[in-house]
Amino acid sequence: MPTERFQFPGAAGHMLAAALDLPDGAVHAYALFAHCFTCGKDVLAARRISAALTLKGIAVLRFDFTGLGSSEGDFANSTFSSNIADLVKAADHLREIRQTPAILIGHSLGGAAILAAAEQVPEAKAVVTIAAPSDPAHVTDMFAEHVDAIREKGEVEVKLAGRPFSIKREFLDDIAEHNLITKVTRLHKALLIMHAPTDDTVGIDNATKIFVAAKHPKSFVSLAGADHLLTQKHDAIYVADVIAAWAGRYLNAVAVTPVASLPEEPRKVVVSETRASKFQQVITVGPHQILADEPIAAGGEDTGPGPYDLLLSALGACTAMTMRLYAERKALPMDHVTVTLNHKKIYARDCEECETKDGMLDQIERVITIDGKLDAEQRAKLMEIADKCPVHRTLTSEIRIVTTAAE
């Protein structure tokens, strides 16, 4: 996932730090991501969702609001209105350098800001909120014990997530003036609301209010078990997967190469590190992309199948396909076939038919379940055909692997 880092001028003239995460291949759409209150563009949820979306061909622009992260300006002088203005500036900048974002995504207070800013990004077709409050003033609950002091003194330093931030009276006055629900009723864009029922920072009732106020098309997805900040990686990846699948309905269709024009030779498989975790890889085969990883017990994060899982998958898929082709060619009543595989190491001395007698051997166990009104002879023939699938033949024949360094 290549990332372009740059700055652009915010609404108040301060230079805001931004990161544009790009897919390795073609860009199908651009998205703008707004992070949570006092967070930054590099917060785990933003980075993980962005990385997962790039695997779906969606480029994501994330940036630090004024006074946060690497952006210029004083956070104490920022307001909810200034955040909205910065979001519009970000969309304008993306329009100038690439393309206007078709998807607007906001997390927590960033979700409220996205809803408020959406009407000022007319080209955007889809809006996504994640754990967003229905009233931006909800954020004051995070420092409720200081609100009176802020109004009395004009500015008070409070601790949020263990860090000190100065909050001014102007912030309270500004956020109280925003009627977000009114904005939602005239959104006129597809809306996806994602929220955890057990969110103890922004309650699920906020999602209900937004959903009820919004006009169709609107969708709600429950993030069962997730926390407010999506600290678990699998939750962030799930969010990205759902966004990509949902948004595809509202974006311009991506041109697909006709089957007739596809090359006859096997497609190249490209495997590249994502650097999102220790072992995670993205595997690209033509228009398809999948993740590979190691299980947690092996030091990975289990975000995708492991190398041996993929090897077994290839054998299993080839086995089932070969059996299906034979069954159709011979008009056999095979309704369904399931192939279950397992890989393990065994002592060579325990394999009577193996030539190797010392050390350990790899053993793949394959169990085939065939459904259908087949007689014994037909089932036996199908089992025989299973051993003739191309991948099976490759694995049991002499293999030559040629490795060279890229120039």
Image: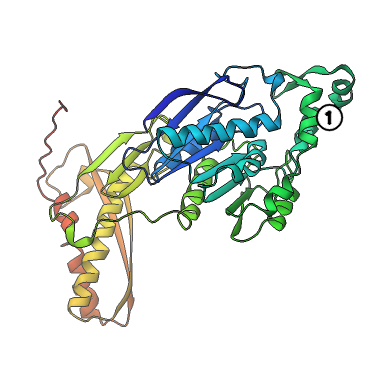
The answer to whether residue 301 is seen in the rendering is no
At horizontal 67% and vertical 53% (from top left) the residue drawn is 186
At horizontal 35% and vertical 53% (from top left) the residue drawn is 254
> Which quadrant of the view contains residue 381?
bottom left
- The x, y position of residue 51, in whole percent, is 44, 36
The answer to whether residue 309 is seen in the rendering is yes
Instruction: Give 369 or 344, whichever is nearer the viewer.
Output: 369
- Left or right placement of residue 3 versus residue 189 in this view: left
- The x, y position of residue 403, in whole percent, is 14, 32
- Left or right placement of residue 119 versus residue 133 in this view: left
Task: Sort mark 1 into few (<14), some (14-19) or many (20+) by Cα contacts within 10 Å.
Answer: few
On the image, numbered disc 1 is attached to which residue? 144
- The x, y position of residue 170, in whole percent, is 79, 25
- Left or right placement of residue 387 versus residue 162 in this view: left
Q: Secondary structure at mark 1?
A: helix
Instruction: Give 333 or 75, whichever is nearer the viewer.
Output: 75
Way the structure is coloured: rainbow
Instruction: Give 299 or 7, whichever is nearer the viewer.
Output: 7
Quadrant for the C terminus in the image: top left
